[in-house]
Amino acid sequence: MSVRIIHPVSLSIIHEEHEHLSAVIQSMLYFVRAIESGGKTPELRMFRAMLYYITEYPERVHHPKEDQYLFAKIKERTHQLDAELDALSDQHRHGELLVHRLQDALLRFEFGGPAAFPHFRDLVEQYAHFYYAHMRSEEERIMPVAKQILNDQDWKEVDAAFLENRKMLDEAGERYRYDELFSLIAAITPATMGMADPV
C-alpha cells in the first residue's frame, strides 16, 4: 500500500495540543519571571490552574494517545525508532513526577516565603527545558518518520482512534472544560502561541 499523501488528522491534533501545552509552559515561565523581577505577580491560584491543566490534559489525554496509537503503530512498521519511542514514553511518566515536584515547590513557596522561591523557579525552568525538548523530539524526529513509513490503512486506524478519543471527551464535556481552563491561563500571559522554546 502507498504512503498517505494528505496530512493525517492525528498529527494535526498532536501539533495543536503541543501548541497549547507550549503556551501553558510560557505562562508558567512568565509567572516566575514576574515574581523574580519584582513586578506584579499573578495570583498563586493561577499557577495552580496551570499545574492542574498539565496534570489533567497531557497526562490523562495527550500522552496515552501517543503511546497507545501512534507509537504502537510505528513499532509495528519499523524498529529503527524503538529506543527513541521508549525514551519518549519514559519521559511521559517522568513528566508526572516533575509536576508533583512543582506542586510541592509551589506549596513551599506559598507557605515558606521568598526563601523558597529560587527552588520553585529552578524547577519551573527545568520543566520547561524538559518539555520543550520532548515536544521537539516528537515533532522533528518521530512525526517525519511516521509520515514516511505508515501507509494509508495505518493512518486510518490512528486517525480513527484519535477522533474517537476526541468524541468521547466532547460527549463527557471534558474538552470544553480543558478549553475553558486553557483560555483562563492564556489570558494572563503576553505570549504568542507556538513551539518556539522561550527558556
Image (cartoon, rainbow, N blue to C red):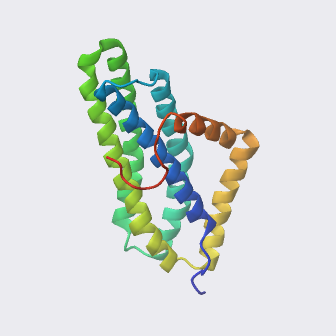
Residue name at image x 57 percent, y 46 percent: 61
Which of the 4 image quarters holds residue 65?
Answer: bottom right
> Among all residues in the image, which is located at the extreme right?
171
Comparing 93 with 22, the one in front is: 22
Residue name at image x 72 percent, y 39 percent: 173
Whether 176 is drawn above or below 83: the answer is above
Whether 146 is drawn above or below 173: the answer is below
Q: Count the numbered circles shown.
A: 0
Position of residue 93 measured from the top left corner of the image (x, y, whole percent): 40, 45
Which of the 4 image quarters holds residue 122?
Answer: top left
Position of residue 17 measured from the top left corner of the image (x, y, whole percent): 54, 52
Residue name at image x 48 percent, y 45 percent: 23
Whether 164 is drawn above or below 179: the answer is below
Position of residue 62 measured from the top left corner of the image (x, y, whole percent): 54, 50
Which quadrant does the N terminus fall into?
A: bottom right
Which of the 4 image quarters holds residue 123?
Answer: top left
